[in-house]
Image (spheres, rainbow, N blue to C red):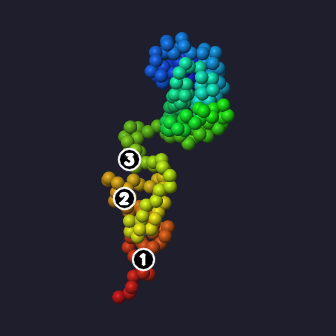
Amino acid sequence: MRGLLDEAGLVQVAAAASGARPDDVLTTCDVAQLASVAAALETATSSRDAAARVVLEVARRRPFRRDNAAVAWLAAAVVLAGDGLRLRIGGTTAAAVVEASPRLGPAEVGEILDQHVEPCLPRGRRALRRLIGPRPLDGPGLFPCPACGRLLVQRRHDLVGSGVWADAARAERVARCAVEHGGHGRRGEPRRRDVVPA
Ligand SMILES: [Zn+2]
């Protein structure tokens, strides 16, 4: 795919990533390695493939004097943004991919990218997503059912049980416990068979 990122585009990205002037980046980079990176991008079949290739090629060839890992991921973000996709990758994952780059191929990096891209959202929806959207899980979490105290496993899409969402989260948990365990009704009311007839 021509026109995604050529040598000049890569230099611009490197300048942005390292806070340097493009002229300085150009005079200090390894031009032969830079040309090889650009050539690898020309044979990419999609922007996803190009993003995977630019990560791999910059990480392996290290054409710039410094910040090659940052350049690699920023270049991928630029390529994906052209396709309406936003890259969201943590520092640990990003560093691990760069370190493993000699043993990875574009297909494998493409699969990693799939886990870390999402459609670009307008600003308002982005803010909303931060409020109510799924959050990364920090390990298996448990919380007690507000109605009966039975432990429920935390899930990625659970509502955040604080602030304005507290009531909605409480209702969601009670209803989920009702479905999963059947110890009470969806609003926490005793099940009919448990009610002693008068
Ligand atoms: Zn319950």
Residue 131: which numbered mark, if any? 3
Kindly identify which residue carries mark 2: 168
Residue sitting farthest toward the left: 164
Q: What element carries label 1?
A: loop
Q: How far apart are the alpha carbons under marks 1 and 2?
A: 22 Å
Q: Nearer the viewer, residue 139 or 152?
A: 139
Residue in view at x 55 percent, y 28 percent = 69
Q: In this view, does 181 lie above or below 4?
A: below
Q: Is mark 3 on a helix, strand or loop?
A: helix
Kindly identify which residue carries mark 1: 191
Residue 182 in view: yes
Q: Is residue 46 above or below residue 154?
A: above
Residue 198 left/right relative to 109: left
Count of marks, rendered view: 3
Where residue 163 sits in the image (x, y, percent)? 32, 53
Where residue 5 sits in the image (x, y, percent)? 56, 23
Residue in view at x 66 percent, y 35 percent = 104
Q: How far apart are the alpha carbons under marks 3 and 1?
A: 34 Å
Identify the image quadrant of residue 144: bottom left
Q: Nearer the viewer, residue 92 or 10?
A: 92
Disc 1 to disc 2: CB gap under 8 Å: no
Comes first in the chain, label 3 or label 1: 3
Where residue 102 sits in the image (x, y, percent)? 66, 31
Residue in view at x 48 percent, y 60 percent = 153
Callout 1: CB less than 8 Å from ligand 1? no
